[in-house]
């Protein structure tokens, strides 16, 4: 090999270890003279420099991508000193809280209501769905409108109060942005006021997207999710503390260092897990399973005599249970979890999704209560699975033709048996859209002096086709006319 080869090569030589630190050149006399550089890094502008052939735009640093509403994050409270961030000074909108007994009356139809936030409210404790979180951030207060479908759903819930959840397994369906998440939240708020035990999961995507730790349990042969189970127990106790203190544990619960006897109030069982958080997180799936079994039977009294007939609530299951899940379709699709062989884990092999699907399919049921789910068709990573589409007959929601010869999972089909759909109208009625418009107008999120509100309302309602989400985000908040 010639001695000039390292000097002519485009990159550093691999032949010897010394060529990376020295370059070989010829002197005037023809002798080989090694010349050492102060650094082994290539000289800027030479072909050996990384990214030499990549053309860079000098104005690249000057351009900044404008964030969308969904990319905006909440500022710290210390920085939100302007009156614009004060929910009490931005606009004046007098509205009553959403009450279950009032929301069912005809006079409350098309009325503006707000969710109460001064008590252990499900919206505060369990959280809000992803899309509603940003909408309520802009509004500064969680307002909603009592629609016709709201009263229809509440009538169904009232009927299911005295029947097993086996007869009340409903999935809210409809076009993307039609208001399924808001309707589910209205049902949750009204049932908690009626004395139900409410278990609300606003983002079921987090159960399958591999954002929570999981561990395999050889006894149940499932992958348990201890951290998420601990969160559910905490939130259940915060929202339903009064009811859980009156429901007894149905079976002995054997933990690592103690045994909780049957007959212990469920609130005390959950408090044991919270008091010893560091050690009990790993046992949270077993505690959650024991609590759910106790809710199924709700042991109030061993026997009922003639003297206690007047106290019927001590002889029968007193508290109906509502299991409400948003992003419901994510439970029936593929998960991001992997086993030690890096094979995909099915959702029915995860403890919490399996528990929810067992209640949804009727394999397990509450003596009194209902199971509600809401589809979220805006989740592009978790589209509507074929098994759930066939079970609910949602062919009209297909974005493309689906072949009947595509393979369906028999295991997933078994978890869809008996599900019924409650379709949310794809369009807001004129009265419903007008109430939504009044919310944003009176909260001063839209509008300016001398605005022609009638023309703007009709134009944006027509452009959006009556879709609730498009009417707000692509109509009212994206226009320059206001």
Image (tube, helix red, strand yellow):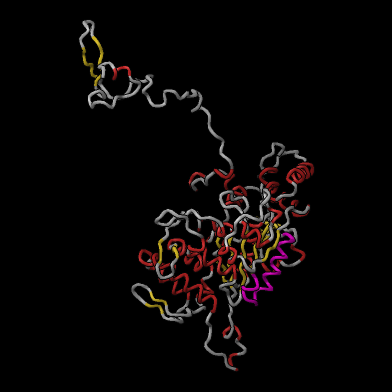
* Image height of 199 relative to 54, above or below: below
Q: Residue at x 60, y 73 (%)?
A: 195
Q: Residue at x 51, y 55 (%)?
A: 335
* Image height of 52 relative to 95, above or below: above
How many numbered marks are there?
Answer: 0
Which residue is the extreme one toward the bottom? 306
Q: Position of residue 221 (x, y in %)?
A: 43, 67
The residue lying toward the viewer, choosing from 81 and 451, is 451
The reply to whether the magenta stretch includes residue 341 is no
Q: Quadrant of the C terminus?
A: top right
* Image height of 417 relative to 31, above or below: below
Q: What predominant SS class does the magenta segment belong to?
A: helix
The reply to whether the magenta stretch includes residue 161 is yes
Q: Decide if residue 139 is in sight here.
A: yes
Quick check: 156 left or right of 313? right
Q: Decide if residue 97 is in sight here.
A: no
The residue lying toward the viewer, choosing from 143 and 304, is 304
Which residue is the extreme one toward the top? 29
Start-end of magenta stretch: 147-168
Snapshot quadrant of residue 202: bottom right
Q: Quadrant of the N terminus?
A: top left
The residue lying toward the viewer, choosing from 57 and 130, is 57
Q: Position of residue 247 (x, y in %)?
A: 51, 78
Snapshot quadrant of residue 450: top right
* Image height of 62 relative to 206, above or below: above
Q: Residue at x 40, y 55 (%)?
A: 341
Q: Residue at x 57, y 71 (%)?
A: 197
Q: Position of residue 113 (x, y in %)?
A: 68, 59
The residue lying toward the viewer, choosing from 190 and 388, is 388
Q: Position of residue 131 (x, y in %)?
A: 60, 51
Snapshot quadrant of residue 94: bottom right
């Amino acid at each position: 090999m010639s001695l000039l080869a390292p000097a002519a090569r485009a990159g550093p030589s691999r032949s010897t270890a010394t060529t990376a630190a020295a370059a070989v050149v010829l002197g005037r006399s023809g002798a080989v003279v090694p010349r050492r550089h102060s650094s082994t890094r290539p000289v800027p502008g030479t072909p050996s420099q990384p990214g030499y052939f990549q053309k860079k735009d000098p104005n690249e640093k000057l351009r900044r991508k404008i964030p969308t509403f969904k990319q905006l994050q909440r500022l710290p409270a210390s920085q939100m000193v302007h009156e614009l961030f004060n929910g009490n000074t931005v606009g004046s909108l007098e509205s009553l809280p959403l009450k279950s007994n009032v929301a069912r009356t005809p006079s409350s139809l098309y009325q503006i209501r707000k969710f109460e936030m001064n008590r252990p409210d499900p919206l505060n404790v369990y959280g809000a769905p992803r899309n509603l979180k940003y909408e309520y951030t802009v509004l500064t207060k969680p307002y909603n409108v009592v629609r016709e479908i709201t009263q229809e759903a509440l009538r169904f819930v009232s009927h299911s109060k005295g029947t097993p959840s086996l007869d009340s397994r409903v999935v809210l369906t409809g076009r993307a942005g039609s208001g399924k998440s808001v309707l589910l939240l209205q049902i949750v708020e009204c049932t908690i006021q009626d004395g139900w035990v409410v278990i609300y999961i606003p983002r079921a995507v987090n159960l399958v997207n591999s954002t929570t730790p999981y561990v395999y349990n050889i006894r149940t042969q499932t992958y348990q999710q201890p951290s998420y189970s601990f969160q559910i127990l905490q939130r259940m106790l915060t929202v339903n503390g009064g009811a859980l203190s009156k429901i007894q544990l149905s079976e002995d619960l054997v933990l690592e260092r103690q045994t909780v006897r049957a007959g212990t109030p469920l609130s005390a069982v959950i408090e044991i897990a919270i008091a010893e958080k560091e050690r009990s997180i790993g046992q949270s799936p077993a505690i959650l399973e024991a609590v759910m079994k106790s809710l199924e039977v709700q042991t109030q009294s061993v026997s009922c005599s003639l003297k206690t007939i007047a106290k019927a609530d001590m002889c029968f299951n007193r508290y109906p249970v509502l299991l409400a899940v948003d992003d419901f379709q994510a439970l029936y699709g593929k998960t991001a979890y992997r086993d030690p062989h890096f094979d995909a884990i099915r959702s029915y092999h995860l403890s919490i999704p399996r528990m929810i699907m067992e209640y949804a399919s009727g394999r397990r049921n509450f003596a009194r209560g209902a199971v509600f789910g809401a589809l979220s068709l805006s989740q592009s990573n978790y589209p509507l699975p074929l098994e759930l589409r066939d079970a609910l007959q949602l062919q009209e929601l297909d974005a493309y033709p689906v072949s009947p010869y595509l393979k369906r999972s028999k295991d997933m089909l078994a978890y869809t048996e008996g599900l019924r759909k409650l379709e949310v109208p794809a369009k807001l009625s004129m009265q419903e859209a007008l109430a939504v418009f009044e919310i944003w107008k009176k909260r001063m999120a839209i509008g300016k002096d001398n605005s022609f509100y009638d023309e703007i309302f009709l134009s944006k309602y027509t452009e959006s086709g009556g879709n609730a989400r498009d009417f707000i985000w692509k109509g009212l908040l994206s226009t320059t006319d206001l």
